Image (cartoon, coloured by chain):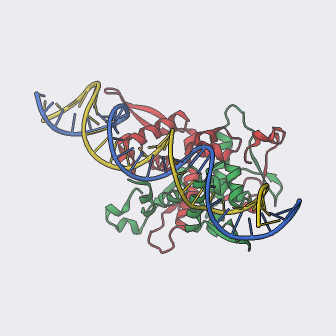
Chain colours: A red, B green, C blue, D yellow
Amino acid sequence: MKWHELGDMSCPVARSLAILGDRWTLLIIRNAFMRTRRFEDFQKQLGITRHLLSDRLNRLVDKNVLKKVMYQDSPKRYEYRLTEAGLALYPVILVLTQWGNTWLNEKGEHPPLELVHEPCGHKTDSQLRCSECGEALHAKDMIPVMDEAAQLPSSRRDIL
Amino acid sequence: MKWHELGDMSCPVARSLAILGDRWTLLIIRNAFMRTRRFEDFQKQLGITRHLLSDRLNRLVDKNVLKKVMYQDSPKRYEYRLTEAGLALYPVILVLTQWGNTWLNEKGEHPPLELVHEPCGHKTDSQLRCSECGEALHAKDMIPVMDEAAQLPSSRRDIL
DNA sequence: TCCTTAGGTTCTAAAAAGGAACTTACGAGC
DNA sequence: GCTCGTAAGTTCCTTTTTAGAACCTAAGGA
């Protein structure tokens, strides 16, 4: 199976990863959350090749994760900003931060990146909680349900 | 910059993505959460080439995300199971599921994958909350702090 | 006129991914 | 003891992607 075919699958994880699941895209988005907006800045900060950066930024604009905003008229210059869909990726960056802090620092060689929650003023560990009962969510307690999908022919049900 | 060099960076997102940030790894992990454990099953479900699957599974074992467990003695057969670090990736899968459900289904062509939280019995939308004050977390309220890193030479501070 | 800045595009070589066939080690059936 | 089937890979060859460096364009300033 070719990679781009994943975008048509019924599984939402496959569709998300068809946009986000390559070696640079989530790093670009991380930097966008750190207020990076311009081509040159992304390129210097990430060390990505200009060619790839151009390709990835255009893809993200095409997929409505970033938008181009003109910030100078002559010569015309555009910067890249997170759209509403892009801002909604913050949880992805946050859980990757916490996983890296916790599980990829066994020898203690990296100072953890701590996050202060400004409204309450404390260093925070984010927790995923159920919107209904408020309890912390764990894999073993979750049951996937795909009502309509059950009525699709099995060839369209894909993975999940 | 080459991809594998990211694993040494001080940013935990870069270190996480040095393991998870390619086209197949998170899909393999998604299927592991769906109880897939054997080489043949991963291959059939994902449509990944056998070569790549072998490479990715070995890498995940090497990085302590999966472990090989013998399930048959003769001939010796092993299956791949999530380690503690692997199980800790559930939030990543969950937030990607929700983002895909919400933002990659504009034409309504995909039935959303709904998740029932078994202990309370309701369909849930997971929410990221602050461990200290319990409020929902948003990008604009978070301040990254890297105490010790501030004392490192700037060449070692990398991106964040 | 020449230099600088921002945002790319072009070129070539190297690395990674895709696809199909082959291997190994066993057990079962005939 | 021959053939088939299964699980888990490995090999070989082709096609795509990436990496890295150089080049291009359009405008402003010294």
The quarter of the displayed image where residue B29 is located: bottom right
Residue at figure coordinates x 47%, y 74% from the top left: A108
Of residue B105 and residue D4, the one placed in the foreground of this image is D4
Relative to B44, residue A114 above or below: below
Residue A73 is at least partly visible in this image: yes
Looking at the figure, which quarter contains the N terminus of chain A? top right
Relative to B84, residue A7 above or below: above
Q: Is residue D20 left or right of residue A108?
A: left
Tell me where residue B123 appears, x and y as whole percent: 79, 50
Q: How many marks?
A: 0
Tell me where residue C16 appears, x and y as whole percent: 49, 51
Of residue A117 and residue B149, the one placed in the foreground of this image is B149
The quarter of the displayed image where residue C23 is located: bottom right
Residue B127 is at least partly visible in this image: no
Tell me where residue C12 appears, x and y as whole percent: 32, 41
Relative to B92, residue B78 above or below: below
Residue at figure coordinates x 37%, y 65% from the top left: B150
The quarter of the displayed image where residue A15 is located: top right
Q: Is residue B59 left or right of residue B155?
A: right
Relative to B148, residue A11 above or below: above
Q: Is residue B19 left or right of residue B129?
A: left
Tell me where residue A142 appears, x and y as whole percent: 76, 57
Residue at figure coordinates x 59%, y 39% from the top left: A4
